[in-house]
Image: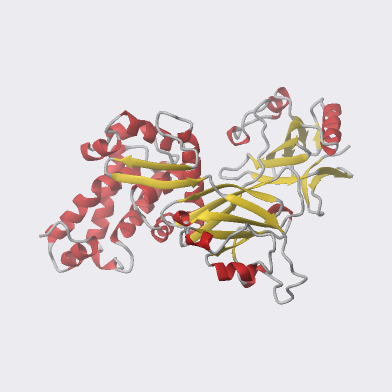
Amino acid sequence: MKKNLSDQELYKEFLDGNQEAFNIIVKRHENNLIYFIMKYVNSLESSEDIAQESFLYIFKTKKEYDFKYSFKTYLYTIAKSRAINYLKNRKENIQFDENNVNLLSTDIDNILIENEEKEGLMRTINTLKSDYKMVIYLKDIHGFTYKEISKILDKTPSQIKMLIHRARKELRNRITKNNSMYKIFINFIIISIFIGSIAYASIIVYNNFIQKETKTDFKNNPDYYDYSQDMQHYDGIYYKKIETYNNYLIDLKKWSGLVEMTEKDFENSFVVVIAGENYHTTGLYISNISADTEILHIDLNKKDTYDGSTIISTKVSKDLNRPNIIVHNNPNVPNMSTKYIKIEDIPKDYSQEQAIADGCFVISANQVISNNRELFNTFIENCNNGIDGILRVYEYQELTNCVQIIDIECKNKIINTSRLNITFEGNHVVYSSGNKINSNGNTYSISDEIGNSKILFSFES
């Protein structure tokens, strides 16, 4: 039996009655499967049992495998389902303890913690939240495709792409703070992480880009009335690539203020045009451009003041040209660190008494119960006058029995807010920005220059 046959070739041999072919498949995947299961199950022994059960299930139901999927995807999907069932039965939390890495079999142990640097890398990966760890493991360490990961984790491919983008960005941010692990270059930062012979990821961060802002000339182009005519759309942002000089000349009629390009420039570069239609997707700037093996990532952030620009164009090296683009509109995150803990770190049992002790403005069942009402009024007035400051609001909503935390920061005449419902697991922080806090009766909301408004909280006077 040739051990270099593919999984599907071995499986066909197995279907024809060759027991040895199945044994090769088991040996090929067993160690990595156990490590995968341990990201759900905090027990080496239980992980080994679940891996065995998964292989046994496949052995007994061998004709159920659909060859249009990779065998590895099929195997990991079964293992994930059994791991989750195990946790439900045992009522355990889904977590992964980094200390269990040392308990893995010798082969895995040698791959993952061969030396101090790799051990440090694993510790950094294990500080990420569980879904970030999982997609990094599946995509960058084990090489699954987006489609395969979406099947394993039961999410859409677009959700997986964004999750991977955010996980890699968070990991990169944590790692680059450690100068002993990476050397940071001025124009290009190339991060290559190797775990044994397995490449974690090759991420190029491109800092040497040029960007320019403009507006769309709809008036002189009556046939061009909607960005969807020639642009792709993702998460409220429209974008397109211009890869030839001829197309660039055509697009100059719509956007006269595009980044300057000559015909020769297109030999080594291309242009990305990004368009926004409302307050949250206009007045932005490009804060970061990076690329992995499949996707060009462009990060956007809000400028301190809105100048009316609706289009950003940037000149990018062809070295970063990828089949796909993800444009991510990063929120303006209030910086509360001088006075409060991170909003994501607030525990579910955070009480009104603790919030009052921490200096929060506390609302309970529509009543203000903290004694800092005057401070609150001054803060709101200062925000509307462009004076910098921060305030955290704790609001208990009696009708829904929920606790919301609202952070407000005024900086450079921009008001940024974040909101988190701490009552339920899995809630995400919601961000919004504006330039004024309005009160309509008992309700306070944040509004922007073009009339968008979002309610923050309410209480009785």
Examine the rendered structure and indicate whether residue 195 appears above or below residue 71.
Answer: above
Q: In the rendering, at what x and y percent does residue 346 appear? A: 61, 32
Q: Is residue 156 visible?
A: no
Residue at 47 percent across and 54 percent down: it is 320
Quadrant in which the N terminus appears = bottom left
The colour scheme is secondary structure
Quadrant in which the C terminus appears = top right
Going by the picture, which residue comes out furthest to the left?
1
Residue at 67 percent across and 43 percent down: it is 332
Nearer the observer, 415 or 323: 323
Whether residue 134 sits left or right of residue 304 in the image: it is left
Nearer the observer, 385 or 421: 385
Going by the picture, which residue comes out furthest to the bottom?
223
Q: Is residue 58 visible?
A: yes
Examine the rendered structure and indicate whether residue 134 appears above or below residue 59.
Answer: above
Examine the rendered structure and indicate whether residue 143 appears above or below residue 173.
Answer: below
Where on the picture, by quarter, is residue 281?
Answer: bottom right
Whether residue 23 sits left or right of residue 185 in the image: it is left
Residue at 40 percent across and 32 percent down: it is 181
Q: In the rendering, at what x and y percent does residue 327 appear? A: 57, 55
Q: In the rendering, at what x and y percent does residue 125 appear? A: 42, 38
Where on the picture, by quarter, is residue 59?
Answer: bottom left
Whether residue 192 sits left or right of residue 437 in the image: it is left
Whether residue 248 sits left or right of residue 112 in the image: it is right
Q: In the rendering, at what x and y percent does residue 244 appear? A: 53, 67
Nearer the observer, 137 or 50: 137
Q: How many marks?
A: 0
Nearer the observer, 129 or 265: 265
